[in-house]
């Protein structure tokens, strides 16, 4: 069954935590961080869900009176990759941002994360600058932007 894209709700917290643990090692969110992102921050969160599970998510951070949003997290369960799900989540988030009047999106991606870079380039992002030693393991990140 093709996953269905919808806004995240409080009931998705445990599934999102599990997905985070499956998709990331060093850079994953801890429980408190995820709680903050989902319930307190000015975030826009969409998930891809099957009947039983959440298989992908996107978290976009926004700030009051600032027309620039930031994709903070995007992950897809390994069993569901290369099916266009990340692309759909990005399109859904982008549409929602446009409707709310946002003008620009940015994100950071690891210099070695070629899969994610290909996705973002295919979605019209371009490299703005390199952020040296951005990640805990010392890897650099590319800062990408897209005008909406
Ligand atoms: C990066 C990630 C989100 C992509 O999710 P996905 O659902 O597989 O991506 P999509 O199927 O929507 O891919 C869309 C396009 O992105 C590119 N792409 C995605 N995965 C790729 C890969 N492994 N290698 C090369 N290109 C890739 C392709 O251009 C692809 O189009 P195509 O399948 O028609 O060739 C997923 O691999 C993931 O969760 N990785 C671990 C977490 C992560 O790195 N998140 C991003 C942090 S910045």
Image: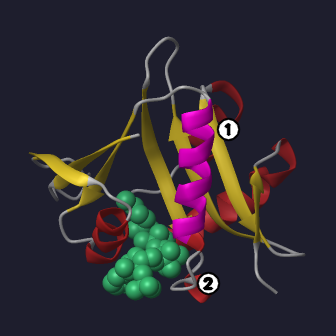
Q: Is residue 84 above or below residue 120?
A: below
Using the image, tell me which numbered label, if any, was put on residue 146.
none
Please state the quadrant of the image where ligand 1 appears. Answer: bottom left
**Residue 33: quadrant of the picture:** top right
Q: Which residue is mark 2?
A: 80
Using the image, tell me which numbered label, if any, was put on residue 38.
1
Q: Could you tell me which secondary element the residue under label 2 belongs to?
A: helix
**Residue 84: quadrant of the picture:** bottom right
Residue 42 coordinates in the image, percent (x, y): 60, 26
Q: Is residue 44 above or below residue 80?
A: above
The residue carrying pointer 2 sits among few (fewer than 14), some (14 to 19) or many (20 or more) residues within 10 Å by Cα, namely some
The residue located at (81%, 72%) in the rendering is: 53
In the foreground, 135 or 87: 87
Residue 19 coordinates in the image, percent (x, y): 64, 67
In the foreground, 48 or 145: 145
Q: Is residue 64 above or below residue 127?
A: above
Q: Could you tell me which secondary element the residue under label 1 belongs to?
A: helix
In the foreground, 4 or 72: 4
Label 2 beta carbon within 8 A of ligand 1: yes
Q: Is 105 left or right of 46, judged from the image as shown?
A: left
Residue 101 coordinates in the image, percent (x, y): 54, 26
The residue carrying pointer 1 sits among few (fewer than 14), some (14 to 19) or many (20 or more) residues within 10 Å by Cα, namely many
Count every numbered label the image shows and give the total.
2
What type of secondary structure mainly makes up the magenta span? Answer: helix
* Magenta part of the chain: 86-99
């Amino acid at each position: 069954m093709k996953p269905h894209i919808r806004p995240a709700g409080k009931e998705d917290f445990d599934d999102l935590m599990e997905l985070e643990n499956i998709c990331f090692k060093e850079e994953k969110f801890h429980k408190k961080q995820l709680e903050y992102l989902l319930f307190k921050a000015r975030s826009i969160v969409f998930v891809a869900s099957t009947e039983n599970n959440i298989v992908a998510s996107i978290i976009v951070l926004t700030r009051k009176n600032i027309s620039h949003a930031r994709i903070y997290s995007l992950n897809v369960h390994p069993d569901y990759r290369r099916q266009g799900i990340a692309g759909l989540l990005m399109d859904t988030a982008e549409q929602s941002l446009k409707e709310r009047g946002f003008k620009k999106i940015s994100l950071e991606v690891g210099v070695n994360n070629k899969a994610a870079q290909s996705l973002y380039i295919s979605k019209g992002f371009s490299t703005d600058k390199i952020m040296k030693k951005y990640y805990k393991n010392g890897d650099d990140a590319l800062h990408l932007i897209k005008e909406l």
